Image: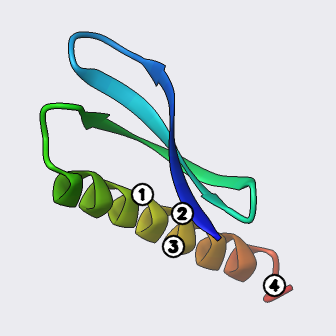
Amino acid sequence: MITITEQFKLTGNRCEYALCINDEIITTFKHSRIGSMGDCLRAAAGAYDTYEQSVIVNRYLDGGR
């Protein structure tokens, strides 16, 4: 299951959210509560893409393991 949960409020309407897969936090991202749900989902997708790229780079640096 994929979930997005608010972790804590930053300043103003900005909050930090966690993107989780099966109750494991994969990455976090910031989003303004004024923005739309679509904006939030795009921010989550961008955060996941960054996470996925770091996994690929780390796998390469570890010799493909």
Residue where numbered disc 2 is placed: 51
In which image quadrant can residue 26 be found? bottom right
Give the Cα distance between marks 3 and 4: 16 Å
The label nearer to you, 3 versus 4, is 3
> SS for tag 1?
helix
Total marks drawn?
4
Task: Write down the residue under mark 1.
Answer: 47
Give left or right: position of 16 versus 23.
left
Q: Are marks 2 and 3 in contact (CB under 8 Å)?
A: yes
Q: Determine whether, in the image, residue 11 is placed left or right of residue 18.
A: left
Gap in angstroms between the C-alphas marked 3 and 1: 10 Å
In this rendering, would 20 be left or right of 29? right
Disc 3 or 4, which lies upstream in sequence?
Answer: 3
Quarter of image, res 64:
bottom right
Is 41 placed left or right of 19 in the picture? left
List x then y, in percent, for residue 52.
55, 73
Query: Residue at 34% across / 63% down in the picture?
Result: 46
The spot of residue 10 in percent (x, y) is 37, 15
Reading the chain from its start, which is encountered first: label 2 or label 4?
2
Closer mark to the observer between disc 1 and disc 4: 1
Amino acid marked by disc 4: Gly
Q: Does the CB distance between marks 3 and 1 fall below 8 Å? A: no
Sequence-wise, the earlier of marks 3 and 1 is 1
Residue 16 location in percent, x, y? Answer: 43, 31
Crowding at mark 2 (Cα within 10 Å: few <14, some 14-19, many 20+): some
Q: In the rendered view of the protein, which quadrant contains the N terminus?
A: bottom right
The residue beneath circle 4 is 63
Q: Residue at x 30, y 60 (%)?
A: 41
Residue at screen point 61% across, 79% down: 56
Label 2 and label 4: CA atoms lie apart by 19 Å
- Give the image location of residue 48, x and y in percent: 47, 65
Query: Secondary structure beneath disc 2?
Result: helix
